[in-house]
Image (cartoon, rainbow, N blue to C red):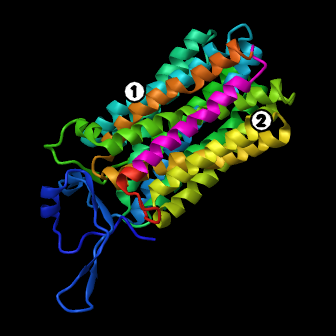
Amino acid sequence: MESFSERKSGDTEASIANDIEDKALIVDDSVGGASAGHKTKWATVEFVATADLRAEEATDKPADGAYAWMVIFACFISLMLSIGINDAYGVYQQHYQLTEFPEATTAVISWIGTVQFLIMCVGGVLSGFLCEHFDTRVLNAVGAVIMGVAFIGGSFCTTVGQLMATQGLLYGLGASFPFVAGTSIPSQWFTRRQGLATGIALSGSGVGGMWMTSATSALIDSLGRPWAMRVTGIVSMVAVLAVSPWMRVRLVPHRGERIIDWTLVKDRRFCLFLAAMAFAIAAYFGPFYQMPSYSVVVLHKSESWGSNMDTLMNGLSVVGRLAVGMLADITGPLNLLVANTALAAFGLLVFWVPFNTVGTSIAVTLVFGFAIGGIVSVIPVVAAHVFGLARLPSIMGLLFISYFVGGLLGVPPMSALLDGVGQRTDYTSSIWYMAMLPVCSLLFLLAMRFTITRKLRVKV
């Protein structure tokens, strides 16, 4: 398999910078030399970002070293708590829907988790800029405090509106800092095994979603929802504060760079990437939010069984993150993003749309969990590989705009379909909608892939 990572021989950084402005250089021929029979193999494709060529070192710590792995550990913990709490919201939704606010519609209750994620995305745009210009260690610590205050404050709330303001809005604002830093920093610290390192860091969100789903369910059952939120708030604040000293960037863009590199939106590849990620993120939360209540209402299982399905899905997402992280360095991150998106669509269309049995529900939990874990793991690697490392925090900030759109396209319409068409008992229309989202994402990813190169056996 040919590689996208080789440099065209004889080119200097200066000459490449003059000729290329964040584009892919495609050279795929063997060129005859001066003597008969002599051939020089030119690089197939190389992505060269001029922001990387002008990047400044933010620390004297070397890439690929022991300190780099400490950074990965810090990102793992930060994502485990920030995104893990968001992934575990399905347990809260089940509790609100079936116990605490049975008179409220599913669509209204789902807005608590949706607002949480949307504010993380909106805050992510600002956080991307701040991470490039200020100390990410301080920003991560500030986010940890806001996260803790949000959940402790939410424990005293008694209405959906109050929870939307605390558990939703305030928590989302705080979590945006470790969210952006944790997803964008890992790729900067590795020149080798970049995919593996990023996969390990991002597996923290899956690990967090896995154990926090079970822990939240157990805490609500034993202590009640208010104390479950207080414990969660304290643990998340202390743990993220503890690892904040290692949450630092290795590269920063040259001081002359723009705050937000809007020239990216002129790049057809980036626009296709934005569209694909909007639909991918829209698909992400549906099964996590709806599987617990689906298990109770349709499969007639207990609430704890429903939360265990979320735990299982998060567990498989960890496996997907690690597996894709290892394979990304071999087969290419964009190739794997395409494959995992196809797998997510396959799982929903084949196992969940036609059936409503326990066995097929477990199957969709396993397949979708693995696939979606691989998707979120490889997104930053694709962004770094194609569009450049130095501006990755800002690039991720722009991606969060598409995540915001995805948040609006995902759970709210699914919940509205469940309320309006399914009368809160028939999930068919909601599941069909859910299944179409990764299909749309796949179409945009294929367009991006073939815009870069139409060759199939190419590492990209």
**In front: 460, or 158?**
460
Q: Residues within 10 Å of mark 1 (few under 14, many from 20)?
A: many
Q: Which residue is mark 1?
A: 122
Q: Is residue 207 above or below residue 192?
A: above
Q: Residue furthest bottom?
A: 36
Q: Residue at x 74, y 24 (%)?
A: 427
In the image, residue 74 lies at what x, y percent?
A: 47, 50
- Type of amino acid under label 1: Val
- Which secondary structure, mark 1? helix
Q: Which residue is mark 2?
A: 354
Q: Residue at x 57, y 50 (%)?
A: 340
Callout 2 touching callout 1 (CB < 8 Å): no
What's the magenta region?
Answer: 423-449
Task: Let me know if residue 424 is in the magenta part.
Answer: yes
Is tag 2's residue or tag 1's residue first in the polypeptide sequence? 1
Q: Residue furthest front?
A: 36
